[in-house]
Amino acid sequence: MNLQNKFKQMRKQLLVFLAHEIALPYFKWFRKSYYFPYSVTQLSNCTKGSVGHELFLFFQHNHLQMLPHYEKHDIKHVVLGYPPTEEGEVSLQCFMLANGRITLPVLFSVIVGLLIMPERWSAFARAWKRGRRTRSLNKLDWFQLIPQPLAEVRAHISNLQIK
């Protein structure tokens, strides 16, 4: 394995560690408790093209399991169109930070991403600009989006762009 591939593998392991060993406990301890009212089976039975069904496909296509306290995060991936890759994770956090979501996990993710992925800065800048141009999504009830058509939700968010 060459040095570049070894670095990418270490980077991936670091991001997984940060997500599962730092962010998840943070969510459990500090985030306001909520109940996600859907199981994976219920998501699979949602109307095709809905946010819920697309969330089910997101889990299936990316070989992911639904994790408690991460449901809202995964809905954001689906709605905002950022894949669950290293670049997609940091891009999502850049969008959210620029959009006004200022929390320790978001700040930490952006800082770490900028430090360990300088080759992705242009993607992070695009996500940042998109987040700045979009009116705040901080009051959005992400769980209420589950039955709604994904195309309509994305169009609505696009209409929130500040001209």
Image: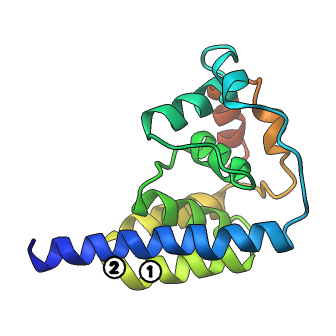
**The residue under label 1 is which amino acid type?**
Leu
Per the model, the C-alpha gap separating discs 1 and 2 is 6 Å
User: Residue 121: percent from the left, percent from the top?
Assistant: 38, 73
Q: Are marks 1 and 2 in contact (CB under 8 Å)?
A: yes
Left or right of 157 in this view: 130: left
How many other residues sit within 10 Å of disc 1, few (<14), some (14-19) or many (≥20)? Answer: some
Q: Can you say which quadrant of the picture contains the N terminus?
A: bottom left
Tag 2's secondary structure? helix
Left or right of 142 in this view: 107: left
Is residue 16 visible to the viewer in this orientation of the structure?
Answer: yes
Q: Which residue is mark 1?
A: 114
| Residue 102 lies in quadrant | bottom right
The label on residue 118 is: 2
Residue at image coords 75%, 55%? 69
| Residue 44 lies in quadrant | top right
User: Residue 47: percent from the left, percent from the top?
Assistant: 68, 14
Is residue 121 visible to the viewer in this orientation of the structure?
Answer: no
**The residue under label 2 is which amino acid type?**
Pro
Q: Is residue 155 above or below residue 16?
A: above
User: Residue 22: percent from the left, percent from the top?
Assistant: 63, 76
